[in-house]
Amino acid sequence: MMGSADSDKEASTDEKPRHKVTVKPFSIGRYEVTKAQYAAFVKDTRHPSGDSCWSFTTGEWKEQTGADWRKPGFAQDDQHPAICVNLDDALAYIAWLNDKTGLTYRLPTEAEWEYAARAGTDTARYWGDNPDEACLFANVGDETVKQQIPGWRLDIHHCTDGYAYTAPVGRFKPNAFKLYDMLGNVWEWTCSKYPDKDNSPYDGSEFSCTNDANSRRTVRGGAWNGRPHSVRSAYRDRDNPANRYGNLGFRLAQD
């Protein structure tokens, strides 16, 4: 069952109606694509990294000139998820990887993403309904973020995960499908179009990829700065294909 029930007080309009979905067999990455993996692609292709990335290092979003996936404004090592990558960057990486391997990787549809994230659960989060149990399973906006990021004013999960920004992939407990960081750490691009109007109900676009280069895409999963409301299996957000953010990366899928 995709989306949120009417009884879910945290639900937004665009998480409804709750509906039954069936997905064809597919594979999805156990981890988010890492900085080391993305670096190999850039080294081989000289893919441009852009001249700015939106950052949250001061407690509010600002576009930082000179920031990119190499230097997003905070420390990362090779096993952290690749961030400051827009949709074109993710698709270029996939095209390169497919050429290298002879396989057919892609981004997941939104329906596939939620199926993978829920891993058979119907609770708000794959560990249950309590947001304050997040720190065993996800890197989220928590006590660490509140202490280390100046000017933090948002709601937090009342637990401590030890990471103010991104964490190396796989540091937290996986869901029942043995997938890591499906919630928290970084938002993940899907290939599905987000409805033209904000907070619109589901319209069927969750089942497919769009070829419209200018359409907003649904992003899923919440991130290292995610509030309890946004770190839920049903929560939907959206972004313009050209935008690069310090909390947005991607995960691979495959038929």
Image (cartoon, helix red, strand yellow):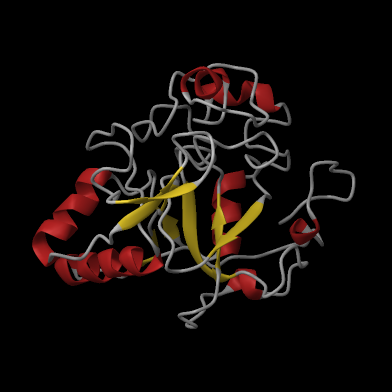
Could you say which is closer to the camera, residue 74 or residue 111? 74
| Quadrant of the frame with the C terminus | bottom left
| Quadrant of the frame with the N terminus | bottom right
Give the image quarter of residue 230: top right
Rendered residue at 38%/33% (across/down): 170
Left or right of 16? Residue 147 is left
Left or right of 235? Residue 242 is left
Left or right of 249? Residue 208 is right
Give the image quarter of residue 95: bottom left
Rendered residue at 44%/38% (across/down): 180
Rendered residue at 75%/57% (across/down): 15
Q: Position of residue 243 (x, y in %)?
A: 44, 62
Could you say which is closer to the camera, residue 176 or residue 40? 40
In the displayed structure, 2 sits above or below 208; it is above
In the displayed structure, 184 sits above or below 243; it is above
Q: Position of residue 202 (x, y in %)?
A: 74, 68
In the displayed structure, 141 sits above or below 214; it is above
In the displayed structure, 26 sits above or below 251; it is below
Left or right of 254? Residue 138 is right
Q: Position of residue 88 (x, y in %)?
A: 35, 70
Residue 119 seen by the camera:
no
Residue extending furthest bottom? 212
Could you say which is closer to the camera, residue 176 or residue 140? 140
Residue extending furthest left? 44
